[in-house]
Structures are given as structure tokens and as C-alpha cells.
Amino acid sequence: MRQHTSDDTTDPVGSRPPIVVLCGSTRYWEQIAEAALYETAAGRIVLAPGCNLKQPHPLWAQPAQAERLKQLLDGLHLWKIDLADDVLVVNPHGYIGESTSREIAYARSLGKPIRYTHPA
């Protein structure tokens, strides 16, 4: 774990950078990665989806594996929302799917500020 010191030039005031969680459909995986890049360059800690189940991979090759992993990932993403200071919804063309809608509702229930990459 990184040790923080008072002479750390990347964080002169001694407070942690804001944490943002990215929400959005993995069908827009490239846009999620781009948003992560911009948020990181802005000095934020980025929490994002960790897997793209729409791309083939041995971890979710079987339907039962994929369903179990989807349930796990959905729960983990809610924990990421809990940890975040705010939410950035990656929604090209205004698209917000069922899972993302659920995540937005959860973030709102916690009073988290929500931003969108495109008008909702």
C-alpha cells in the first residue's frame, strides 16, 4: 500500500482525490475506457466495470458460469457505488439500459451526485 507523506507533491493538501464510479453498458466498453482515461487525467480515482461479458473469455464461456459472474459483478458494482464520491454514467446516444438504470437508482438513494457523458 502506498504510504502518504506530507511532502508528497501529487497531493499537497493531504486529502485523497475524489473517487468516481463509471456506470454504463459494456456494449460501450471503448467509451467506458475513454471516460476512465479522462477521469484519471483529471486526478480522480476511477472505479469501473471489471469485465466485459459481451467478449468471449474462458471465465464465462458456459452459460451457468456467465450467470454466476453477472450476479457477482452486479453486487460488486453496487459496492463501488458505495465507495464513490460521485457517479459518471457513460451513455453514448443517451442509452441507459436496465442494469445502469438500477445503478442510477441505487446511487440516487444514497444521495450520490450523478453526471452523464451525454444528455439523458
Image (cartoon, rainbow, N blue to C red):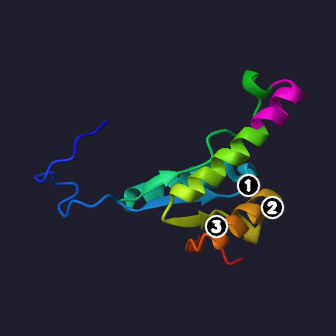
Residue 64 counted in the magenta span: yes
The residue labelled by disc 3 is 107
**Which amino acid type is shown beneath numbered disc 3?**
Ala
* Residue 102 locus on image (x, y percent): 76, 62
Label 3 and label 2: CA atoms lie apart by 15 Å
Mark 2 is surrounded, within 10 Å at the Cα level, by few (under 14), some (14 to 19) or many (20 or more) other residues, namely few
Location of the N terminus by quadrant is top left
Label 2 and label 1: CA atoms lie apart by 7 Å
| CB contact under 8 Å: marks 2 and 1 | yes
Q: Residue furthest left?
A: 7
**Which amino acid type is shown beneath numbered disc 2?**
Gly
Please report whichever mark, 2 or 1, sits nearer to the chain's N-terminal start: 1
Q: Secondary structure at mark 1?
A: loop
**Which amino acid type is shown beneath numbered disc 1?**
Ser
Q: Residue at x 77, y 29 (%)?
A: 56
Q: On the image, which quarter does residue 66 sit in?
A: top right
The residue labelled by disc 1 is 25
Query: Residue 108 bears which disc, if any?
Result: none
